[in-house]
Amino acid sequence: MSQMHRSADQPTCPSCEEPLEPGDLFCGGCGHDLSAVKQRPDDHPTLVMHGAGQTEPRTPAAPAPPAAPGTPVAPAAGVEWPPATGVDSSGTPVPAHLPEEVPGLDSTGSRLPEHPGDFELPAPARASAVPPGPSSSAPPVPSADPRTSAAGVPAPPAGAKICVACRAGRVDTDGYCENCGHAQPRERDHMEQELGSVAAVSDRGLRHHRNEDAFAVSSAALPDGSPAVVAVVCDGVSSATRPDEASAAASASANESLLGALERGTHPQQAMHDAIVAAAEAVNALATPVAPAHEHHHQNAPACTIVGAVVANGLLVIGWIGDSRAYWVPDDRGGPPARLTEDDSWAAQMVAAGLMSEAEAYADERAHAITGWLGADAYELEPHTASFKPDRPGVVVVCTDGLWNYAEGADEMARALPADAARRPLHAAQVLVGHALDGGGHDNVTVAVLPFAVPAQGAGSA
């Protein structure tokens, strides 16, 4: 529809801007009901901001100090604003307000304070904690967190755990902030530990709601005074109940058993076997029913996998049940790396039986279905142990499938492992966890790194 020529004073429809005639009850262009809408007043703004039809944003400045009584206040540049006159009851000149300081509505539609003193100035306008000198470039003082006591939140008592989200509220015993309600990261979401020449890192990953992995690293003195280094990694079975408790119990029990046996002089391979049995008993104990009359108390019992490594007297001992793995990577990357464990899994059984190639088996959706684990539902406890006597220095990588899913072959694991892993085991473990997270982090990721040094007197391969 063509637009008709109209004068500047002629009223228009508030819906379509069509010119209106006096007495119209409906718009002739769009049919808008004019009876419920007041016509726009024929007035003009009394303030002209920097020229007709144009406004310019300006950063509010700190209020100027009060002028002496009787001193006229200069008008704001570009604004037709009359000077304030007179004094208040205390004899102080009446303050002059800039247009942007006049009470109005904020961005939410709420009424602004009637008096400028009812609100605080922005943080940069406040006095700095360290007054700058003539040529000082002191950094600005950080503004107060709006979620702290200024918003009515009392300061948490000394020593209380503070929310990682609002940084103001106290965290309750259930792990939630009393101020904003944000759930706090759990202690097991990310764990790191370095102990001499062994280090481990565990991370929840990017897809799981909790970390069901666990690890233990330690060292012991053998009867002859030589050191023994231990690493145990466990992966909770997600389809079982309380898998996080199962992995924690297994890693702690295996570690304690290994330390005690090694210090008594038990051969490391026998000590590893006994440690896995002890771990299994600890996980089995979690399935004990609270009520004796409970039926099917072994149904869906807590379960986990386990893999452990011991380095002692030039000997490397590995033990495992399930599909957590151990890899050997020599310091001289010219030598071949090796996988030291065989999975207790459907895919491994298919390959061992000659029914499928390794590529075919691990491409199957049943590939990671485990056939061995720790827990009351396990068919039969059959710890696997193996002893190695490397003839060169290297690094042992002990990990859950959350890592090796992204570096399955020994060559892939060697490429992911930093070249200085023997000197910086914690950094190496962090890099490997990062490799899994960068790859997608679909599972919990746990890895321990143990450097292996050939004894000074040398040792031939076993």
Image: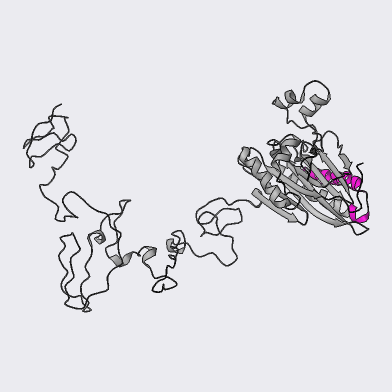
Q: Is residue 13 left or right of residue 385?
A: left
In this view of the protein, which residue sits in the foreground, 199 or 373? 199
Q: Quadrant of residue 408?
A: top right
Could you say where residue 45 lies in the image, as x and y percent from the top left?
Answer: 14, 52
Could you say where residue 80 lies in the image, as x and y percent from the top left?
Answer: 15, 60
In this view of the protein, which residue sits in the foreground, 297 or 180? 180
Query: Quadrant where the C terminus lies?
Result: top right
Display colour scheme: one colour
Is residue 248 visible to us here? no
Q: Is residue 420 left or right of residue 43?
A: right
Q: Is residue 223 left or right of residue 360?
A: right
Is residue 106 visible to us here? yes
In this view of the protein, which residue sits in the foreground, 138 or 23? 138
Q: Report the residue at 69% width, 39% height from top.
A: 402
Q: Report the residue at 73% width, 49% height from top.
A: 421
Please check the rendered image and state whether residue 353 is part of the magenta-colored stretch, yes or no.
Answer: no
Q: Residue furthest front?
A: 334
Query: Quadrant where the N terminus lies?
Result: top left
Q: Would you say the magenta stretch is mainly helix, strand or loop? A: helix
From which residue to which does the magenta span run?
Answer: 261-287
Residue 268 lies, with reference to residue 358, above or below; the image says below
